[in-house]
Each structure stands twice: as structure tokens, then as C-alpha cells.
Image (tube, coloured by chain):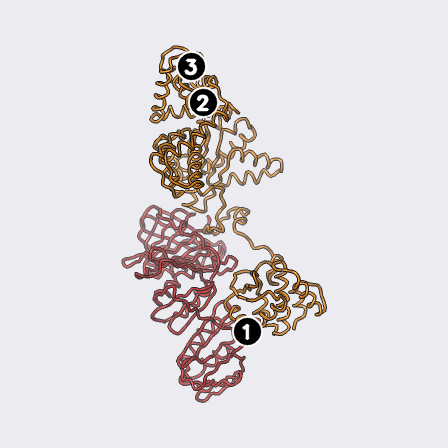
Amino acid sequence: MDKLGYFEICGLPLWKSAGLTMIVLTLGVGSYMQDVKGLWQSVLGELEMSVSEAHFKTWLKPTFIVSSEDGHIIVGVPNIFNKKRLETNYHADIKSLLTRLDSAIQTVEYKIVGKGPAGATMENASAPLRPAKRTEPTARREAPPRRGEQIAIPTSATAPQSNLNPRYTFENFVVGSSNDFAHAACQAVAKSPGTKYNPLFIYGGVGLGKTHLMQAVGNEIIRRDASKRVEYVTIEGFTNEFINSISKKKNESFVEKYRNVDVLIIDDMQFLAGKEKTQDEFFHTFNALHQTNKQIIISSDKPPKQLVMLEDRLISRFEMGITVDIQSPDLETRSAIIQSKATRMGIVLPLEVVDYIARHAQSNIRELEGTLTKVLADLDHNGGEPTLARLQHLLAADVASRPKLRPISPKTIIDRVAAYFDLAAADICGTKRDKEIVVPRQVTMYLMREELGLSFPKIAAAVGGRDHTTAMHSVSKIEKLVETDDNLRGDIGAIRERLNAAIV
Amino acid sequence: MRLSLTQENLSRALASVGRVVSTRASLPVLANVLLATDGNRLRLSATNLEIGINYWIGSKVEEQGSLTVPARLFAEFVSSLPHGNIELHGLDSVLTVKSPHYESKINGISAEEFPLIPTLTSDPALTLDAVIFRDALAQVVVAASADEARPVLAGVYMYIEDESLFIVATDSYRLAEKRIELPQGAPKEFSVLVPARTMQELVKLLGDAEGDVEVYVDENQVMFRIADVEVVSRLIEGQFPPYRRIIPESAETSFDIATAELARITKVASLFARESAGSIRLEIKSEGEVSVVSNDSEVGGNKSSAECEVNGEDGEISLNARYLTDALAAVKSPMVTVAISGKLSPCVISPAGENATDDYLHIVMPLRT
């Protein structure tokens, strides 16, 4: 018998064998999982004294306790041979030893488990001391490509990590007239990155799906070729990393990271405004990638020309590829989005309900999702059927709560609309009947109704003391137009954003 | 234990089970083969605790019993005996082997010490034709990794999809996939990752076997039963990489050529590629010629060409000669199609010609140039 072996297994300093009794006693008093390991070590220790070393090493040493509950112990074994051996040759001894050490134990079961917990066996315990195995991803990054180097199949273990959200795919992007061009351009880029449209510049208001589309491109490129390195970053993240790299004097790793990607996706480009050093760095990154035909995808809330705070050399580069916009979705698209989302959540909504939500949430998809989630949460919580009446009730509370959250005055609306259309507030409230003024005036009244819930006489009074029927007519006209006219809907969306921004 | 059997049967059985005997086990009995009577048959068993084999042979049993003897000595001894009947007599742990003019005693170890090689008793998860299965495994197992550092790549992945059994292996530099169409009524769901070493043994064991192979799966174990042989192995835990997406759907350049011809010029070129770790370059001319080029500063260089049928534009790619040779041997078709798309995309080798099937493909990743 190998005494030292026993003490190693117990993980204890060199004791005399009387020490075993002491451990046993403590174990008897102490209770479970904490002591389970010690318990098993005691069992193994005793068994080692009665079986040959070779047998012990082969059959007993690579075992450990998986669980111990209600007097039922599960012993993990490495393979079927050990399992059979323990069951047929050692079970009686193991059982009686366990019962002696802890009278609560009644049954013992053996289960094949791939790997024991760290430290369960001596082999495992010493494992961390071995030199770490070379892992593929780091090797890929550290070693520059050599001539004659064997290219590996990108398996999940070796594939470069991307920070894309896998939920964003083309399959679950609802295409409508407001975004079909952007969608087509993105698909073309996904099919042949770096060649067709480079850079791809997507702009549009908040919550219209820019991020979804861009990430869908990235996910699709990886799906087609898992070895492609796709990096998604918001310009804010890019800026922070850049600043960190400078302060930590690790600029090389920053440069290395962004200039060795196959596809670079930059979100919210408008926030680069006014950051000169970062603009400079981004300019060089852009050039390095563009010259080697690496795809660049950029999103912003405005087209390149309107990013006035950016350097001209950047803006001109953004316009080298293709610029596409995403508009607010029209009614059909919104309905389709609601349908698609509800279906994915496994809920069938009546058409009228879909229609109502689509009409209720106009400005962006995030709002649409929010409304839908609210409806679904209510269904989930209170049960029953999704009916229109119930929905109206639910959303009425929502509308009523808005004015409190958004203390916008009629005056603010007039100012914002006027500013948006490059008019004076006096024009809105004036009497001129030019088309350029009439529509903004009607939009103003529409927004007063929608955003503030004002009565028609109040609206009429606020916009230069008109008749309340004029207000009614204006509001209903815009209500209709908004469903069909993409441009107008875009305008209204933009004004709404500014209104909300005004509060903050 | 007392029985008699033919030298031929015993020798063949020992050669088969002997392959899994542990050579350096800490437990001496694992270097032994178990002989145990089982009704009118003799069962031979061996295991290295990763794979276990039970092998039954017909014999005339006079007295039941069992014991173990050193596998290597016993196998070598039996194979040197003349054809004809052999008598085995086991008493305590000593085996007496008698045949005309020969008699020897071999000291063994009690059968008690030998691990039980379990027979999985569930219903078979899958039944396959032995010849088809053997050929399919042989075509795939070559691509598995010999390195255990990444266990899933040291395995052969088998799964059922669309009424076909797919058998796949990859060491991340090449990949082989074979599809076997299953008869109606075959199971719809099945997926196991079997150690490549088990599959290599299985290919040899299936040798000239006929009939069916039954596959049993239970508790991290897989068992293959072929007539009188059972192979039990652990399964590999883990997820096989989602390999499908690396299979190119189209190619810029492809050519059809006699497999032997391409293998020959590859062999010639590889003689000059030893210094560059087997790096050879395929140059395809759209007029209908493929050249295998190797440059070796020390010994010189070589360019061997062959006529072939080319589809698409000119193309070239650098490959490891050994991987290409392996692929050409594994494709098991007189003609092959080699398809590439540029220097850095996977090279696909698949059967070609009139009777070619589309159930096999072998991918070799290029060398960077």
C-alpha cells in the first residue's frame, strides 16, 4: 500500500493513520456538500488500504462525488468500465463505508461523467500547473499571416468573435416602402462585402431599424464565411477605446484591432462631431480599410452632407459609396411589423387590434415595440382575449399620461414646426395661404391635437384665432396624409423628435 | 475451462481484439485478453478502458470457465501454430494450449480481475449495411484530428437529417463528409460524436464483414454490433462545429480529372516540396490543363501537368500535398472534380464522372501564399 498516496488524496499533511478516525468524526457531525469531498476521500482512503495499488489507481482514484441529497449519493466515474467495476466489485464495500461514515446515507449510484470537478483527482488537481494549451484565436491574432501558413477551417472554437447581436437578421427585418432601398443595398453588401457599395452609409431617425439592418449585414457575412472578422462599434465606443488606448499607451493594439477587420460597422456617426483627434484616427482607419477593399458600414441620423461638424475630408469619403435612408414606416409596414413580432411571440392578434396599434404608434419602431409589449404584457398578466376595447382602454391611460411627462406648450410646437420648415412663427399664425405655409400650419394643429390632446377650439385659438372647424379640417387632413405620404411622415417624425428633445 | 476450436478462427479473433489491448496500462490485466465460454461459444474480450471489444467464436465446449492471458504472447503464439484444431484447457489461472506437435502453458490472471465489457441492452438506435458503413467511415475518418487537445475534432460526427445519415470529420485543415441515404422507416433523430480511434478500429473490424451493423447508444456509450462482434466505446461530449457554412456553394474554377492521374502528379511534385512542409501549387488553365508546381530551394523544383476538363476561369491555389493525396485516396472514385474559388477559399474535392454520386465531399483548406 502506498501511504503517501493516501495522504495526498486526503490533501492533508503527513498524519499518522489514527488521523483517519478524526476526519471521520468531524464528517459525521458536519453536514453535506462542504464535507462530501472529504467524505469521499475518506472512503477512498480506506479502500486504498484493502486493494492493490494498480486496482486502486485504475478503478477508484478517478472517481468523485457528483451529488449527495436525501441520503442518496451519486458517484461520478470516468467510463462504463469503471462503472461496471464499481457496481460489481466494490459496491458493497463503498456502501458500508459510506454508511459507517454518515448514517444518513442510504443509496449509492454510479454515473458516467466526462470530467470531475477540479481537484477531484490528483490528475485534475495538478492540471493547472501544466503549461496552458495554445488556443487558436489568440494564436491567430498574435501571429501575422505567414507565407505557406496553413489556413484553418473556422470552427466555433477558432472563429473570430464578433460583437454582433445574432437576433438581428434579414429574415426578421420587415421590408416596406420606407426602407426597401436600404434593405436592398444592405443585402448587396452582405453578398459581396467590400466590392459593391463601399462605404455603405445608412441614415434615418431613431428607432427605424438602422442598427438592425447593419447588424443583419454583419451576421449574414459571418454566416456566409465564418472566417470573416466583423467588428460592430458605436462611434462612442470607438472614441472611448481610442482615448483609452492613448492614455494607456497601447495605440498599436487599437490600430491593430480596427485595421485588421474585414467588415467595420460604425453606429451613430453623428456623435463624432467635434472630436478632432478621434476624427483623425477614424479617417486613417477608414482609409486603411477602404484601400484594402474591406467593407465599411456607417449609420447616422443625418445624411453625410448635413454632418456639419465633421471634417470635409470625412464627409466626402462617406459619399464615395452609397447613401441610403430609412424613413418612418407607413401604416402597412407598421402593421406587418406588429404581426411579425406578435407571431414570433406566439400570439395571434385580431386585425383591428394590429391596425389600432399601428395607428397609435407612428413615430418609430421602438415606440411600436413598446406599445406591443405593453399589450402583450397585459394579456399575459390578466389573461383573456386581445380586443379592441380593451386595447383602447389600455392605451388611453398611456396617452393621458403623456402630457405630464412632456410639458410641451402649444407655443413650443409652433416654434419647432416653424423652425423645421424655415418659417417664422408669425407665418404659422398668420393668414397667408401659400402651400409652403398652409401645410406647416396644418401640421402644427395636428401635432397640438396628437401631442397635447388640445380641443379644436383651443387649437384654433392658439394658431392665430381661427375657426374651430378649420382646426378640425386641418387635423383630419394631416391624419390622412400621414398614412400615405412618406415625406410628410418623415417630417412629422423629425419634428416630434425635436419636440421631445426640447424638453430635455 | 476446456474447449477446442480451429486455429484460423482463434487467430483471426485475437488479431481483432488484440488491437485495443492496453500496452502500458497500470493494471496488468488490461494487457490481457479474456477467454470465457458462453454456451457453445468462446468469448474473447479486450479493452483499454476507452474501447472494449467482445468477439465470439464457435467452439466445442466441454467444460465452462474463463481466464485471462497476455494478449500479445497468446496471439503471436496462436498465429504461429499450424491450421487445424486447437485445444484450450484452463486450470486456475494457467492456460494450456495444445495442437498437434505443440503444447504450451501460459500464465494468466483470474477472469475476476478483468473489467466487464458491457453489452448495451436498449434497442438499436440505427441499423446500417456493414459494407456501406465501413466504406463510408474509411472515407471520412482520415480527416479527423489525431490531436486530443480539442476532443470534438478527434471525433467522427454522425447525425441524421433529411432521411440521410451524415458522417463528418474535420481536423480544422480538412473536412470530409459522407451522406448515406437511409431506408424508409429509419429513425429521424440521431447524433453521436464517436472517437476517431474507435472508428478506425471499426473500419478494420468490419473488414470483410457482411450483413448489418447495429448501433446502440446509452449513457455516454456507443456500441456497434456486427454479427459476433461488439465494440463498445465512450462518446465524446461537446458540440461538433457548425461546419456546413464553410462548404462553398459555387466555384470560380473547377476541373475534372482521373483521380490516379492527379494523385500521380501530386506525388511527383511533393518530392520537391519536403522542405516547404509539403506546399504545392495547383495551376489551372481554362484551356484544359492543370499543373502541380513545387519549388524547393535545396533540391530544385518541379512542374507536372495533366490535361483535364476545366470549367470557369484560370485559377491557382496552394495546398498541403499530403492533404490532397489523402483526399484523392478517400474520394474512391475513378474521376474527381476539384473546385476552387481563389487562393484563400476552401478547395472542394468530390467524385466525378458518369457514375459519380454526390454523397461525398472532401474539403482541403489552402496554404496562404
Q: Which residue is identified by label 1?
A: A89
Q: Which colour is chain B painted?
A: red
Percent across and percent down for residue B299 are 48, 57
Under mark 2, the amino acid is Leu
Q: Given the image, what chain letter belongs to the residue carrying mark 2?
A: A
The answer, for residue A199, to whether it is visible in the render is no
The label number, if any, that marks residue B76 in the structure image: none
As drawn, is A248 to the left or to the right of A260? Answer: right
Percent across and percent down for residue A323 are 41, 30
Q: Which residue is identified by label 2?
A: A452
Under mark 1, the amino acid is Asn
| Distance in Å between CA atoms under marks 2 and 1 | 83 Å
Crowding around mark 2 (Cα neighbors within 10 Å: few <14, some 14 to 19, many 20+) is many
Q: Which colour is chain A painted?
A: orange
Q: Which residue is identified by label 3?
A: A463
Above/below status of B88 relative to A23? below
User: Which of B164 and A457 lies nearest the eye of the viewer?
Assistant: A457
